Image (cartoon, rainbow, N blue to C red):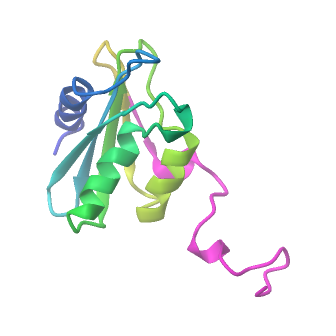
Amino acid sequence: MEDKNLLACANKAKEKAYAPYSGFRVGAALLTREGEVFSGCNVENSSYGLTNCAERTAVFSAVAAGYRDFLALAVTSDSVGFTFPCGACRQVLIEFNPDMKIIMGNINDEYIVERAGDLLPHSFDKESLGKGRLGKNV
């Protein structure tokens, strides 16, 4: 699937965003290795910590449907700047594929592409579990 097509899916998902507090609508579209696309939008809550981002909504939907191998994720908003995944979303994306293509768009239909692992250097991963500061099991 082309980057622009995945961004179009993300833009469509953005229309479903629930953002009554910030007014900042975000949409995401996640491409699986099997060619399936899962979309997500941000869902805000009056208790801001309970808000869920569009990127994680898409990933969690795909995982709930039985998919784990992701190739690309497109994310967009109504901003003139590019929409980057937040830190929590970056950590979730890296969990599944640090080489995943992340396509970040803006309202002007412009986009840039990065690799998930490059967006969050020195991430916490499965290799980090059970290791102390000196690399010994704790």
Magenta span of residues = 112-138
Q: Which quadrant holds residue 70?
A: bottom left
Measuring from the top left, give residue 114's x and y in whole percent.
45, 41
Examine the structure image and report whether residue 92 is included in the region drawn in magenta.
no
What residue sits 44% from the left and 31% below the top?
Answer: 45
Q: Residue furthest right?
A: 134
Q: Position of residue 47 (x, y in %)?
A: 53, 32
Task: Find residue 4 and report its horizontal and vertical position in percent.
Answer: 21, 31
Dividing the picture into quarters, in which one does residue 99 lie? bottom left
Numbered-mark total:
0
Q: Quadrant of the N terminus?
A: top left
Q: Is residue 76 left or right of residue 84?
A: left
Left or right: 95 with respect to 124? Answer: left
Q: Can residue 47 be seen by looking at this rendering? A: yes
Q: Extreme front residue here? A: 46
> What residue is rendered at 27% in x and 27% in y?
14
Q: Quadrant of residue 49?
A: top right
Residue 102 in sight: no
Residue 122: in magenta span: yes
Q: Measured along the vertical axis of the image, is residue 33 above or below residue 12?
A: below
What residue appears at the point 55 percent right and 44 percent down from the top-left corner? 119
Q: Quadrant of the C terminus?
A: bottom right
Task: Measuring from the top left, give residue 98's x and y in whole percent.
Answer: 47, 59
